[in-house]
Image (tube, coloured by chain):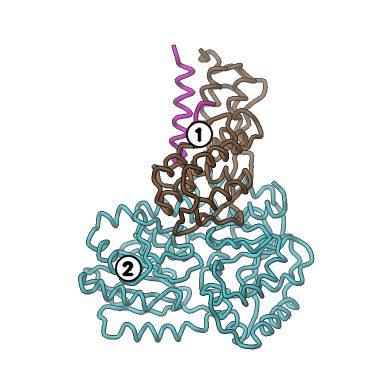
Chain colours: A brown, B cyan
């Protein structure tokens, strides 16, 4: 459908930025499930982003079978496996923001016993993004795919997840650009349908993102 | 120099450092600590300061002065902060303050950003004039002896931000932002670079090691926090099952007056146990450290208290599984069952020593995972980037 767009030149290029998210201790520790819930209510949105979406980076170590820090703590310290899996699979798909993820987490956690106590406490971290310009620009859909396939995942996650998850924009940056420049509705929707919360390997996310784009472009 | 990291961590990681540093080009940064050699802090600064300069920051490093009494006091602070108990002499706080004043009269502190490392020079903040001040705490302050922490906290609250090595060390009673920055190792240094098997064997032979039998190594100061006596006990337990050798390699630091005493305790604990090699080498014995870590089958860091325990990352980088104490920053490096094993007692350490020494394939698999873990998280380039980002965020420039 959009194959013909591969070499069409956009009016405005896609400007690839990238970001790191240095962790900052949030000053809150949770020893029980109840305290974890209180902490989740109190922390800022960056903290939810850090614990739920940041594990996509390979530098943020979580076991392959759990998708976020809360789930890991619930399984390893509270030993409530079924609750851990529910927390692990909380939906983070567009257009949900950290505020909606926070609500979903609390809704799931209400099923557990607040008195449940862990060995080591859960330590809440927050973060602030440090954004930099990679200098890479895509003027066509073809260039966009080429750059996406090799640029740092710091850039991919920044554009695909950060702004949307923090509520700064309703859509991810990639979809917004594709819509604005090429009116590529189905391609934009396909990218939006990827839930980054369920990824703990950054290269897997890149691969699925590119596969989805290819499928949409070369369909029929 | 920084370009040499490209083959190790990739172009993107190195490029990000230059891009972030561009936002800080030309600013002046001072690092202050208490010892020019020996121990992790001096080692980190000897790498970090030249790298900061290379990316356009006017970075300098100065070391405070003190007499024996001052360093006894700061060592007692160090122990009290890490162990939660302490015995302070009546005039400790006065001695500390006196040497802060002396150093304040000698050190120019007029920089855009001042990093003060650890408690020894923390009191310099009282005379801050311009710039942002950041206290970089390398030790475990999660359960401090209250009188010492309250004394120190009075200084720490005057900083613009604090850096701790692990989230575990975060304090709930500080109002300043606490950044979490684990320290790092330099893969290009003499201590961590690739060296040939011939060099490793030459050094092991020089110190009387038998190359045909397994070797267990712990590299750390003769400090009770590193539990050298526990290491001897763990080895003695292992020795009943596996005919191995132990190398405990320490190096004295100028700010650690207890080292000799602990060395003697360790020597006594090792009496009658065969194949224990207690080595006290000069602080610049980096090639020997490299060789003993590479020559080991298993590396230990059986600390009871630890700031971070960089020797763990050094060993993991060399593809060795590590048996580490479940304390401080060690659990960030030793992922239990993946890059090594976490232990709390000598008996647990004995158990995993036997297990690892009997299973070469497990050692190799863990070694590979350990090296990747260090590549992703504990190399100098990452720490440099974290420092730059902390400056940016502290200055409110993002």
> Considering the numbered disc 2 on the image, is that residue within a helix, a strand or a loop?
helix
Image quadrant where one finds the N terminus of chain B:
bottom right
Label drawn at residue A122: none
Q: Using a 10 Å C-alpha cutoff, classify the residue at mark 2 as few (fewer than 14 neighbours), some (14 to 19) or many (20 or more).
A: many
The verdict on a common chain for dots 1 and 2 is no
Q: Is residue A87 left or right of residue A94?
A: left
Q: Is B18 in front, or is B305?
A: B305
Q: Is B107 in front, or is B255?
A: B255
The quadrant where residue B233 appears: bottom left
Q: Give x and y (percent) for residue A158.
A: 58, 37
Q: Which residue is under mark 2?
A: B349
Tell me which secondary structure the magenta stretch mostly adopts: helix
Q: Give x and y (percent) for residue B313.
A: 43, 60
Q: What span is colored magenta in the figure? A: A192-220
Q: Is residue A37 left or right of residue B219?
A: right
At x 47%, y 39%, the residue is A202
> Considering the numbered disc 1 on the image, is that residue within a helix, a strand or a loop?
loop
At x 55%, y 15%, the residue is A5
Q: Is residue B96 left or right of residue B347?
A: right
At x 31%, y 82%, the residue is B270
Q: Is A127 in front, or is B132?
A: A127
Q: Which residue is under mark 1?
A: A91
Q: Is residue A57 visible?
A: no
- Whether A200 is among the magenta residues is yes
In the rendered image of this protein, does residue A55 appear above or below residue B268?
A: above
- Rounded to the nearest angstrom, the CA distance separating label 1 from label 2 is 41 Å
Which chain is mark 2 on?
B
At x 57%, y 40%, the residue is A102
């Amino acid at each position: 459908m959009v194959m013909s767009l591969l070499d069409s030149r956009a009016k405005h290029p896609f400007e690839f930025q990238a970001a790191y998210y240095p962790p900052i201790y949030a000053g809150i520790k949770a020893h029980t499930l109840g305290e974890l819930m209180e902490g989740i209510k109190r922390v800022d949105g960056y903290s939810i982003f850090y614990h739920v979406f940041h594990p996509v980076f390979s530098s943020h170590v979580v076991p392959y079978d759990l998708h976020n820090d809360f789930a890991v703590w619930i399984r390893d310290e509270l030993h409530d496996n079924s609750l851990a899996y529910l927390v692990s699979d909380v939906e983070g798909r567009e257009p949900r923001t950290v505020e909606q993820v926070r609500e979903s987490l609390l809704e799931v956690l209400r099923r557990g016993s607040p008195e449940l106590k862990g060995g080591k406490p859960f330590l809440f971290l927050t973060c602030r993004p440090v954004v930099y310009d990679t200098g890479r620009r895509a003027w066509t859909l073809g260039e966009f795919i080429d750059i996406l396939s090799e640029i740092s995942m710091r850039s991919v996650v920044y554009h695909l997840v950060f702004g949307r998850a923090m509520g700064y924009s309703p859509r991810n940056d990639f979809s917004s650009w594709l819509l604005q420049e090429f009116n590529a509705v189905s391609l934009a929707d396909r990218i939006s349908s990827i839930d980054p919360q369920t990824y703990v390997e950054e290269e897997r996310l890149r691969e699925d993102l590119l596969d989805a784009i290819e499928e949409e472009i070369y369909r029929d | 120099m920084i370009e040499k990291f490209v083959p190790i961590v990739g172009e993107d990681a190195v490029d990000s450092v230059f891009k972030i540093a561009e936002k800080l080009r030309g600013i002046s940064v001072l690092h202050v600590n208490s010892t020019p050699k020996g121990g992790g802090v001096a080692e980190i600064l000897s790498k970090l300061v030249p790298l900061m300069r290379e990316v356009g920051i006017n970075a300098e490093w100065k070391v405070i002065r003190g007499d024996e009494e001052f360093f006894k006091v700061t060592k007692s602070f160090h122990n009290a902060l890490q162990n939660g108990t302490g015995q302070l002499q009546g005039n400790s706080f006065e001695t500390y303050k006196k040497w802060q004043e002396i150093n304040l009269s000698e050190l120019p502190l007029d920089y855009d950003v001042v990093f003060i490392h650890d408690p020894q020079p923390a009191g310099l903040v009282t005379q801050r004039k311009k710039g942002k001040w950041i206290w970089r705490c390398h030790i475990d302050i999660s359960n401090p002896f209250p009188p010492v922490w309250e004394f120190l906290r009075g200084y720490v609250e005057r900083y613009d931000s604090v850096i701790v090595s692990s989230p575990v060390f975060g304090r709930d009673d500080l109002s300043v932002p606490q950044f979490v920055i684990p320290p790092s190792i330099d893969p290009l240094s003499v201590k961590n670079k690739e060296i040939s098997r011939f060099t490793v064997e030459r050094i092991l032979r020089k110190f009387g090691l038998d190359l045909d039998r397994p070797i267990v190594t712990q590299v750390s100061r003769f400090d009770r926090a590193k539990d050298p006596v526990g290491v001897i006990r763990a080895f003695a337990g292992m020795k009943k099952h596996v005919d191995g050798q132990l190398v405990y390699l320490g190096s004295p630091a100028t700010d650690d007056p207890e080292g000799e005493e602990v060395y003697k305790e360790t020597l006594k604990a090792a009496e009658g146990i065969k194949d224990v090699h207690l080595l006290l080498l000069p602080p610049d014995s980096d090639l020997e450290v490299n060789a003993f870590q590479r020559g080991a089958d298993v590396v230990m860091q059986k600390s009871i208290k630890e700031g971070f325990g960089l020797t763990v990352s050094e060993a993991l980088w060399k593809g060795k599984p590590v048996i580490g104490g479940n304390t401080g920053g060690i659990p960030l490096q030793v992922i239990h069952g993946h890059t090594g094993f976490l232990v709390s007692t000598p008996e647990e350490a004995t158990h995993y020593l036997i297990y690892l020494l009997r299973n070469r394939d497990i050692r190799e698999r863990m070694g590979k995972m350990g090296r990747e873990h260090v590549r992703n998280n504990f190399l100098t380039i990452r720490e440099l980037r974290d420092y730059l980002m902390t400056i940016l965020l502290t200055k409110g420039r993002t």
